Image (cartoon, grey):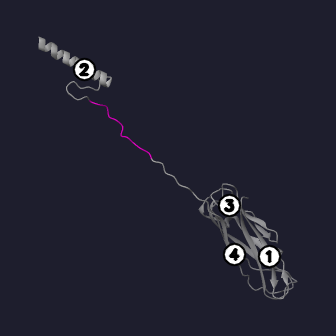
Amino acid sequence: MQRRFIFLCLVIGVFTAVTILFGSTAAFDLASPVPVQAAQAVPTGSASAYVKILPGILSLSSNEVSFQDLLLTGDPVLSEPVANIMLITDSTGCGCGWHVTMRGDDFISATHRYILADNFFLQIEDEDLVSIAGQKRPQSFVGDIYLSRTPRTVIYANPDFGMGTFRTKAEIGLLLPANAYAGSYKGGFVVVAISSP
């Protein structure tokens, strides 16, 4: 009888100890000397990653154009348009937007005769603006215009647009006045990309 009493005291003592240690007897199997523990989550960790993005530049490249020889007729003569391909890249990373201006320079001959810049004819079709990389394409500001010595905005991208690289084709022509002098002339046009519209 005394052995049963000691055995019962031991069982009650173990049961009480398990209850105190684990807060419940639900995780204790009396048939096993080792308590059964609930599955624990596998420890996870996280690591931060950092990058510093440096600003690039707003750039524009444009090719030279050469018009076909024009024959004086006593009337104004419009040359065949020549394609001027422009590549505009906004890698500033500011989302400021930008615009492109164009202006003409007078044609001057070796004998110092002039054909005014106002005779430059320009056409940029909206569908000729193509996005190569980055955001959606910007917009053409003109259909058909004559240039002058005063810069005119011809393409623009609003703030938060126009980031990336874009290609456009400008068709440039020359209106030869009826009173032009014969000779070889050199003129030009200036294309500039400016940050923020």
Q: Which mark is residue 138?
A: 3
Name the residue carrying label 1.
105
Task: Tell me the quarter of the picture where residue 149 sits.
Answer: bottom right
Q: Nearer the viewer, residue 36 or 73?
A: 36
The answer for how far apart the CA atoms under marks 4 and 1 are is 18 Å
Q: Earlier in the sequence, mark 4 or mark 3?
A: 4
Q: Which mark is residue 192?
A: none
Measuring from the top left, give residue 66's x and y in whole percent: 72, 81
The answer for how far apart the CA atoms under marks 1 and 3 are is 26 Å
Measuring from the top left, give residue 5's x and y in whole percent: 16, 13
User: Which amino acid lies under the numbered mark 3 shown in the image of this protein?
Assistant: Pro
Residue occupying image coordinates x 55% and y 55%: 52
Name the residue carrying label 2.
15
User: Which amino acid lies under the numbered mark 1 shown in the image of this protein?
Assistant: Asp
- Which quarter of the rendered picture does the N terminus lie within? top left
Name the residue carrying label 4.
83
The answer for how far apart the CA atoms under marks 3 and 2 are is 78 Å
In this picture, residue 49 sits left or right of residue 137: left
User: Does 87 sit above or below residue 67?
Assistant: above
Q: Are the residues at dot 4 and dot 3 in contact (C-beta closer than 8 Å)?
A: no
Callout 3: helix, strand or loop?
loop
Name the residue at the top extreme. Answer: 1
Q: Are the residues at dot 4 and dot 1 in contact (C-beta closer than 8 Å)?
A: no
Q: Earlier in the sequence, mark 3 or mark 2?
A: 2
Bin the neighbour count of mark 1 within 10 Å (Cα to Cα): few under 14, some 14-19, many 20 and up. many
Q: Earlier in the sequence, mark 4 or mark 1?
A: 4
Is 124 included in the stretch rendered in magenta?
no
Callout 1: helix, strand or loop?
strand
The answer for how far apart the CA atoms under marks 4 and 3 are is 19 Å
Of marks 3 and 2, the one in the foreground: 2
